[in-house]
Image: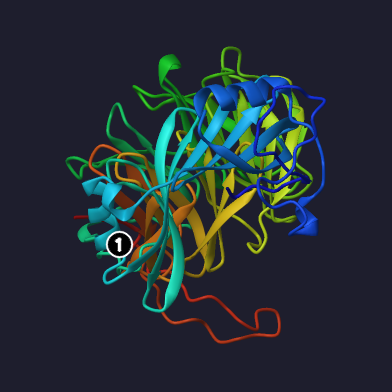
Amino acid sequence: MKHQKAVVLVLSVLALSASLATPLAWSGQAGKDKSKNMKADLPAAVLEAFQAAYPKAVIKGTSQETEKGTIVYEVESVDGLMNRDLLYTADGKPIEIEESVSPGALPAAVRQALKKAYPGHKLLKAEELTKNGQLLYELEVRSKGKVSEVTIDPSGKIIAGTPETAPAASGYRLLKKHVLGGEGGWDYMALDLRTRLLYVTHGNAVEILNIDTGFKGEAITGLAGVHGVAFAPERNRGYISNGRGNSVAVFDLGTRRILAEVPSSGQNPDSVMYDAFSGRVFTFNGRTANATAIDAATDKVVGTVDIGGKPEFAVTDGAGTIFVNNEDTSEVVAFDAGSLEIKKRWPIAPGEGPSGLAIDLKNKRLFSVCDRIMVVSDAENGKVVATVPIGDGPDAVRYDSGTGLIFASNGEGTLTVIQQVSADTYAVLETVPTARGARTMELDPKTHRVFVVTAEYGPAPAPTPEQPRPRPAVVPGSFMVLEFGK
């Protein structure tokens, strides 16, 4: 068993006794290995449970461990030709059983999955693991000169481990180009799933695009340096962050007319989101390194959260916790949507300066994109569980729960398509060319299509002392949304 052992190595007897007064010694090994002559006691309940379940088994060793603050006991045993390791709670309840299994006894689906993932492999070790009622197979294989560990469920699904086979291409390609025109820079996009309207922030306006028909609707104007859009469908309200206006514009989702403007408690509100669990709108304010909470029922500011650095994109777990990337400290910050108290914060090294953020609600995984790397962290304990190479200059990431694909849009002009193999295992399927500057993105979970936004660029102006590295100018009227799919 693979456990971090706060180990007190304990040794057992040939004749098991339920009495705690009898020290345990190694069966048939006394005097042969000094490290195996230590003495300790197992709880009577553990011994009784083991004897009742496996009356012919011989204990080879035991250890005491601490898992999540609870003391548990591991019993290593031999039952005929079978090695069996068990993990018990102090009251004798088995929580994990690991048994050796012959290759021929593996389910056909497991053998087939192993053959496909590791062509020409040699199986070195096979164990059947039952943990919390779930049956899995832990296997050790040698393939292409490399020894790998892989976990497969009875249906043949790889739960952990990286297959040696090369992943297939994603099949994503450019399908349509929607030219919206207009002037100004751009930032986030947001899709209203009910109306199929894509809201695209653009300078001092929000452009509207029907993604099913390609029809361009009337833009929402009269804004000031817009950054993001959020929706509260049950209230038929939308929210736009005015970066230069230090406010949030509230609009009707039906008419798309502005109803109110709510002053932010911070400066330069950037990303904005609605949390249905708390009934609150949150803006993440770049200049003042905080977040503003607005009651969606009253359109009143109800509090401010000190993020401790420049906040970028944020997501909710739908159960009262908000997660936001902190660009300055390269952390994820989690706070309570109700009390507005910081619950936890954790570093995402080796990632630096995270921007886009997405969440896998089922597996409780967060995806933070940084320059050339996506960092996957556990939303419960903050542990970084994986890193994935992506392109340069990303500003958005989306997780498609229907396909298990993750998309990172990179300003260099690429879209990284990543397959989620398991909660902690990821493989890059393809790097799809997009266009220079296409760094922000939206996903349609219905069609599984991806939308990125950019414009055509002209030549850069001549350098000056004030602007030694001037940016190329955007070609007027070339602002567009690019649609990718299969």
- Residue 143 shows in the view: yes
Q: Position of residue 422 (x, y in %)?
A: 42, 48
The residue at 57%/43% (across/down) is 224
Which residue is more in the foreground, 166 or 137? 137
Vertical side of 292 occupied by 198: above or below: below
Q: Residues within 10 Å of mark 1 (few under 14, many from 20)?
A: many
Viewer-closest of 188 and 1: 1
Coloration of the structure image: rainbow
Answer whether residue 265 is visible to the viewer in this image: no
Q: What residue is shown with label 1? A: 117
Q: Amino acid at mark 1?
A: Ala
Nearer to the camera, 220 or 290: 290
* Quadrant housing residue 403: top left
Could you tell me which residue is drawn at 46 percent across and 70 percent down? 147
236 or 127: nearer the eye?
A: 127
Up-down relation of residue 346 to residue 427 (above or below):
above
Displayed quadrant of residue 444: top left
- Rendered position, 373 above or below 367: below
Q: Position of residue 205 (x, y in %)?
A: 45, 44
Dividing the image into 4 quarters, which one contains the C terminus? bottom left
